[in-house]
Amino acid sequence: MLHLLHTFVSVYETRNFTHTAEDLFLSQPTISAQIKKLEEHLQVELFIRNGKQEIIPTKEAIFLYPRALQIIEEWDDTSQRLKNQENFRLQCIIGCSHTCAVYFVPKLIPYLVKQFPNVDFSIKLMNSEEVGQQMAQNKVSIGFIEKPERNEAINQTAIYEDELVLAGKEDSPYWLLRENESGLRFYNEIYLRENNLLPQILYVDNNEAILALLREGFGRSIISKLAISHDIAYEAIHEHHLRHFYLLTHKAVFKDVLREISAYIEILVPHLLENKVF
């Protein structure tokens, strides 16, 4: 049954039997037969097939998808730890957007490691949208992002208020923008639009590269005040000058330790703020 769930998850994510067959190194008729077998076992229709290419998940498939991910994750985790004869330690993968990963999460990690000694924490760096996608696919345990994320499978809690500033020399004709899915790209575009600005755009997909350019006196950009150093000129802004960092958790969490970690983070952050750790 587990292999049928693997096939279902792949078809759900690719919306294409051919792509699933290529990913799983199986023939397309085999993929079709496995989906049919799962449908017969569950006595529901999982996909509506409109022609050869278009695959539309039914409401039953939408219901099954996050649960299938959980079942697969639990089995993979259990079997791997039994094979390795580990001390049954839990893996907690933290997905972080760039600013959170550099200026926010490092403040939390020492406390988390001390509070949860039997948990192996790891950090994956990606943009805000990718964190949401990885969370939805159950590839990340918890997430930290810089802009709101809409996903029915994910809980979102604002845990830190971050001040945004306009950095760079005022007379620079260039504006530095992150990639489309970036949280900072979102706030920069709002500022440019509302202030009717049409600068020359230079696209940079890395925060550290933007900071390096700003230090050289090249370009302007709205960035987190947390990233400002003494050698970067900046000014306060009034429009949309505050944003939140968000904690993402799964709505369907079956591991008690992950619930405990999430609850601890929500309690910890205000405590750290009170003590001006950030």
Image: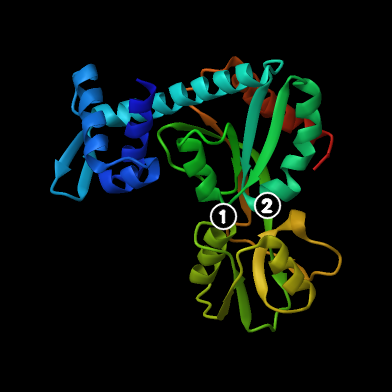
Residue 246 seen by the camera: no
Give the color scheme: rainbow, by chain, secondary structure or one colour. rainbow
The tag on residue 99 is: 2
Residue reaching furthest left?
Answer: 51
Quarter of the picture containing the C terminus is top right
The tag on residue 183 is: 1
Residue reaching furthest right?
Answer: 230
Return the disc, 1 or 2, that comes first in the chain's sequence: 2
- Tag 1: Cα neighbours inside 10 Å, few (<14), some, or many (≥20)? many
Q: Amino acid at mark 1?
A: Gly
Residue 22 x/y as whole percent: 35, 47
Residue found at x 50% / y 49%: 129
Q: Is residue 150 above or below residue 209?
A: above
Q: Quadrant of residue 143?
A: top right
Q: Is residue 99 above or below residue 215?
A: above
Q: Quadrant of residue 270?
A: top right
Q: Is 207 left, or right, of 146 in this rendering?
A: right
Quarter of the picture containing the N terminus is top left
- In depth, the one of 217 and 125 nearer the eye is 125
Q: Is 63 left, or right, of 173 in this rendering?
A: left
Residue found at x 68% / y 77%: 219
Q: Amino acid at mark 2?
A: Thr
- In depth, the one of 64 and 203 nearer the eye is 64
* Tag 1 and tag 2, C-beta contact below 8 Å: yes
Residue 175 x/y as whole percent: 61, 75
- Tag 2: Cα neighbours inside 10 Å, few (<14), some, or many (≥20)? many
Residue 89 seen by the camera: yes
Residue 51 x/y as whole percent: 13, 48
Residue found at x 42% / y 38%: 151
